[in-house]
Image (tube, helix red, strand yellow):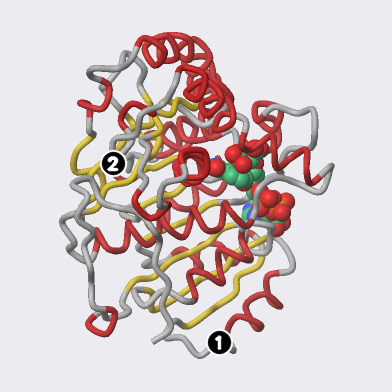
Amino acid sequence: ALHYSFARKSQNQHQTSRNVLQVKASFKVAILGAAGGIGQPLALLVKMSPLVSDLHLYDIANVKGVAADLSHCNTPSRVQDFTGNDELANCLKDVDVVVIPAGVPRKPGMTRDDLFNINAGIVKTLIEAVADNCPDAFIHIISNPVNSTVPIAAEVLKQKGVYNPKKLFGVTTLDVVRANTFVAQKKNVKLIDVDVPVVGGHAGITILPLLSKTKPSVAFTDEEVHDLTVRIQNGGTEVVEAKAGAGSATLSMAYAAARFLESSLRALDGDSDVYECAFVESQVTELPFFASRIKLGKKGVEAVIASDLEGLTEYEKKGLEALKGELKGSIEKGVAFAQKQT
Ligand code: NAD
Ligand code: LMR
């Protein structure tokens, strides 16, 4: 079987090894925004997953060709395309996980919040359809600004009476992927061993890497901590500027989204050792949503690892206090948008 695996260690640094040949493809996955810059490479990675039986690709245009192309790959999953609002309900029926990268990306000079006016409405409409057609699915939100789109999704699901906070995730895996890569490069350690928790949110200073909690333990100078933190926080902008108007991270994002999806599917399949960072409803701070390391299980978030916020360095404590104002504002903006629309 064709198989990929995502290089990372689980919480206890003992990687769960699963025999690919024993895995039965049985999960249905929908990607909304599947013809886009993230959607296409993500669809390819998902097509390679041995856990997926059905791959539903939805977009407002151009998705037929993507699906026809992918469907020729001789991997187990069946690929189907769905175009436009009339086909959205069918796309979502009986789906186990919905991944949402629909929406516009940044251009140089923009913040993620500058995408709010367009993407808030897109996410709202898509989540209404998710609520009506697959309310039990895990929902992975990639569309920016994640700090606001996740609260929007929560409000819409509440309004529909189907909100399950354990199954709604803002995808922050790319922050962890970047942190692991940049730390391994800077400290010349083996990439496969590095795991840095990244907490807070997914924009600028709300992205807070907890370098003191890097596993295995790595010693950093104050200057290294500062340089790495700033680079991780600006990773998205680094790509936006390099692409010079042609969009934001798509390939690394597809990789990160595929990793988070694979972890979710392993959890749904009964693996009891699955940990990822994600932006979820939370009680670890006074903010209603916060990205933390979470334990994933069959029912979604099984535990939020609050202990990651204990014993922080002074630098991390300052970073945590500094991010709260912006993150609170972004969450409230999302909630207000969703409430105003009813
Ligand atoms: P893109 O423009 O290449 O693709 C977006 C796709 O969404 C397009 O195919 C478009 O047709 C589709 N779309 C638009 N409106 C839609 C609707 N109502 N229903 C379904 N599909 C719709 O953009 P991209 O580079 O793939 O980025 C998508 C989003 O992901 C952006 O908001 C970007 O900021 C975000 N992003 C998030 C992260 C993260 O870490 N969470 C990382 C990278 C990008
Ligand atoms: C990223 O972190 O790459 C994404 O959020 C896209 C962006 O706008 O930076």
> Tag 1: Cα neighbours inside 10 Å, few (<14), some, or many (≥20)?
some
Residue where numbered disc 1 is placed: 73
Indicate the position of residue 186 as horizontal and vertical percent values.
51, 38
* Quarter occupied by residue 59: bottom right
Task: Inspect the image, locate mark 1, and give the three-letter code of the amino acid beneath it.
Answer: Cys
Residue under the image location 54 percent in, 49 percent down: 126
Residue under the image location 27 percent in, 41 percent down: 166
The residues tagged by marks 1 and 2 sit, at their Cα atoms, a distance apart of 38 Å
Q: In this view, does 135 lie to the left or right of 37?
A: left
Q: Is residue 19 above or below residue 262?
A: below
Q: Is residue 160 above or below residue 270?
A: above
Indicate the position of residue 342 as horizontal and vertical percent values.
52, 29
Q: Is residue 276 above or below residue 34?
A: above
Sequence-first disc among 1 and 2: 1
Mark 1 residue element: loop
- The residue most toward the right is 245
Q: Quadrant of the N terminus?
A: bottom left
Query: Does residue 143 appear in this view?
Result: no
Front in this rendered view, residue 286 or 165: 286
Q: Which mark is residue 157?
A: none
Mark 2 residue element: loop
Q: Is residue 5 left or right of residue 228?
A: left
Task: Inspect the image, locate mark 2, and give the three-letter code of the amino acid beneath it.
Answer: Pro
Question: Are the residues flagged by discs 1 and 2 in contact, CB closer than 8 Å?
Answer: no
Residue where numbered disc 2 is placed: 216
Front in this rendered view, residue 144 or 132: 144
